[in-house]
């Protein structure tokens, strides 16, 4: 849960000189999200597919009685990614409550990174419009606020397609 994530990254009281991050791998590339935008990490998440939705919509997960949408960031970043309804790990994103889940290849890691090891993202970095910064090891730090406010993660604006139809339509 969020409180245990924050405890792990703020253990020695130096949080003002470091940033807590949840790092994860997608298609062989390392990404991270600030812990402020992560509620929890779930292992062996059972995802129910949603037929007829865009490629980045994997399905929904029952998180303690609440159906939360699951997304594949790799699809939006044009990374090759083999997704499965039986995702091993998902990251529950949200500030005050779970908003959506994103797939991760393998177990995400929680760490504190000194701020001097973080540099602003260069134009054209792989993180797309969410890329806020990179680390000295090449990890792309995604901007959690931009991610949470991206309209592609709001299912009410997506109209599903019948089998055999192409494209995405937004409901006016």
Image (cartoon, helix red, strand yellow):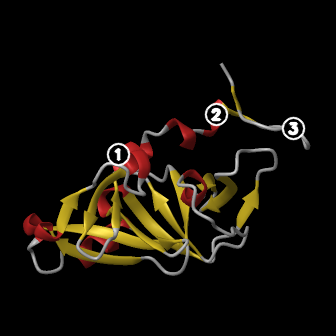
- Vertical order, 12 against 96 (above or below): below
Q: Is residue 148 left or right of residue 57?
A: left
Question: How far from the left and from the top, in percent, is residue 146?
Answer: 38, 43
Residues at discs 3 and 1 in contact (Cβ within 8 Å): no
Q: Which of 165/2 is in front?
A: 165
In this rendering, which labeled residue sits more in front, label 1 or label 2?
A: 1
Q: Residue under circle 3?
A: 165
The reply to whether residue 54 is in sight is yes
Q: Residue under circle 1?
A: 145
Disc 1 crowd rating (10 Å Cα; few below 14, some 14-19, many 20+) is some
Instruction: Name, please, the residue furthest toward the right.
Output: 164
The total number of labels drawn is 3
Q: Residue under circle 2?
A: 156
- Vertical order, 125 against 147 (above or below): below
Residues at discs 1 and 2 in contact (Cβ within 8 Å): no
Q: Is residue 19 left or right of residue 5?
A: left
Image quarter in which the C terminus is found: top right
Residue drawn where x is 55% and y is 71% of the image: 27
Label 1 sits on a secondary structure element that is helix
Q: CA distance from mark 3 to mark 1?
A: 33 Å
Q: Quick one: label 3 or label 2, which is nearer the N terminus?
A: 2
Q: Is residue 149 left or right of residue 135?
A: right
Q: Quick one: label 1 or label 2, which is nearer the N terminus?
A: 1
Q: Quick one: label 3 or label 1, which is nearer the N terminus?
A: 1
Question: How far from the left and from the top, in percent, is residue 19?
Answer: 20, 66
**Picture quarter containing residue 133?**
bottom left
Q: CA distance from mark 1 to mark 2?
A: 19 Å
């Amino acid at each position: 849960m969020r409180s245990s994530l924050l405890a792990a990254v703020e253990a020695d009281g130096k949080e003002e000189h470091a940033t807590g991050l949840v790092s994860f791998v997608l298609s062989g590339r390392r990404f991270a999200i600030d812990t402020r935008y992560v509620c929890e990490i779930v292992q062996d998440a059972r995802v129910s597919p949603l037929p007829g939705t865009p490629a980045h919509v994997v399905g929904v997960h029952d998180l303690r009685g609440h159906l939360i949408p699951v997304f594949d960031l790799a699809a939006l970043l044009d990374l090759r990614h083999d997704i499965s309804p039986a995702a091993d790990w998902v990251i529950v994103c949200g500030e005050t409550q779970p908003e959506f889940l994103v797939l991760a290849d393998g177990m995400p890691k929680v760490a504190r990174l000194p701020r001097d090891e973080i540099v602003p993202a260069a134009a054209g970095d792989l993180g797309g419009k969410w890329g806020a910064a990179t680390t000295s090891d090449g990890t792309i730090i995604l901007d959690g606020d931009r991610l949470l406010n991206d309209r592609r993660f709001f299912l009410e604006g997506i109209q599903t397609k019948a089998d055999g139809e192409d494209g995405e339509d937004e409901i006016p």
